[in-house]
Image: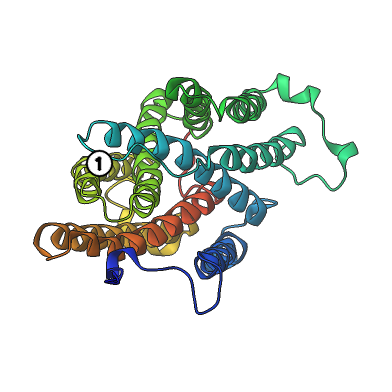
Amino acid sequence: MTSIRPSAGVADASGPGGRPGAGRAVAVLVLVALAALIPLLGPSAALHGTGEAAAPGTRGIGLLRAVLFAALCVPVGEAFVDRLARSLPGAPGDAPRSWAPYAAIAGLVAALGLASVVSTGNLVPHSPAQIDVGGLYGSRDGRLALVEVDAFLAALLCARSRRPAVRLWPVAAVIVAEALRAHPTAEHDPLVGSGLTLLHLTCASLWTGGLLHALRTLRRWGRAEAGPALLGLYARVAAVLLGVITATGVWSSLRRMPSATILDQLTTTAYGRTLLAKVILVAAVAVLAGWARVRLRRAEDPLTACAPARAEVVALGAVVVVSGLLTALPLPIRWS
């Protein structure tokens, strides 16, 4: 019998005598642990020498918001890629097991943690007695925090539904709440800012979650001929998503850091430094995406594009974590 050697794009995850996927699971856990260090250690580095003071609980808030953003990416990406897969003729009918329930649990925990901070006047509670649940109804931020908690609870209940729209409505509510929370009514043109954040967060979730689920789907399909077609279809949509993310990101940055001062603030403020780190990471992601696209078109085995695509997922995960830290740092300019 002739043996078939797996290609570089679909490598065997099992080690000698080990369980299939064990090495990959360990690698994921290590990467998650390293990613958690960014919001935990990042504030001190970003604030060093700026003269700015960190708000109470910056590290914890940054970590919780990063978890919340990641929890949004998973169900959005799954619905997006599953729709692309259904549009391909001859695509295998089987899909990888959904991670949406686990994402909903993680998002619910993060939303509860953030709501507890809001209930104490944006101070970190040191005991359950300090949490004023009723007080959440008395402020705009509190009501938005409750919407996010309720939405993730609904997402958990709907995670096993076979209707994509049912699974996505709760997630959409969280994205809208995040867009409104990021731009208080005292800000200049808050609806413009909320609209930009809504587009930015939606496209980022589609890009990050979509690539993760596309790679999981390709691994499930093995050597199916529809695999390269799915990756190519995702790549074409991702190019548009990158354009929207770049445009909304630049516009949002200019609203907070006017063009006359942006170069100085990118190095002299904590917000600017973290934003610069995010820009560098996004540039690295774009390079990896371009590399994967070249391999997909020109390589003898198109599935070798999975190697740079996996590196792209890791870099996108770092972008998500840095974005969580960015929301917890003081803004360089306070709108009057």
Residue 49: x percent and y percent? Answer: 53, 69
Q: How many marks?
A: 1
Residue 134 sits in quarter: top right
Outermost residue toward the bottom in this view: 16
Q: How is the image coloured?
A: rainbow
Identified by mark 1, the residue type is: Ala
Residue 277 sits in quarter: bottom left
198 or 232: nearer the viewer: 232
Query: Is residue 147 at least partly visible in the picture?
Result: yes
Residue 301: x percent and y percent? Answer: 17, 64
302 or 90: nearer the viewer: 90
Residue 209 sits in quarter: top left
Q: Which quadrant of the figure contains the N terminus?
A: bottom left
Q: Residue at x 39, y 33 (%)?
A: 79
Outermost residue toward the left in this view: 298
> Would residue 336 be found to the left or right of residue 57 on screen?
left
> Would residue 55 be found to the left or right of residue 217 on screen?
right
Q: Residue at x 19, y 46 (%)?
A: 229
Residue 108: x percent and y percent? Answer: 65, 36
User: Considering the numbered disc 1 on the image, is that residue within a helix, a strand or a loop?
Assistant: helix
Q: Residue at x 27, y 51 (%)?
A: 260
Outermost residue toward the front in this view: 1
41 or 147: nearer the viewer: 147
**Which residue, given by chain and number where applicable, does mark 1 sit on?**
247
User: Where is 145 relative to 301, above or below?
Assistant: above
Label 1 CA crowd tier, 10 Å (few <14, some 14–19, many 20+): some
134 or 273: nearer the viewer: 134
User: Where is 309 relative to 255, above or below?
Assistant: below
Query: Is residue 287 at least partly visible in the picture?
Result: no
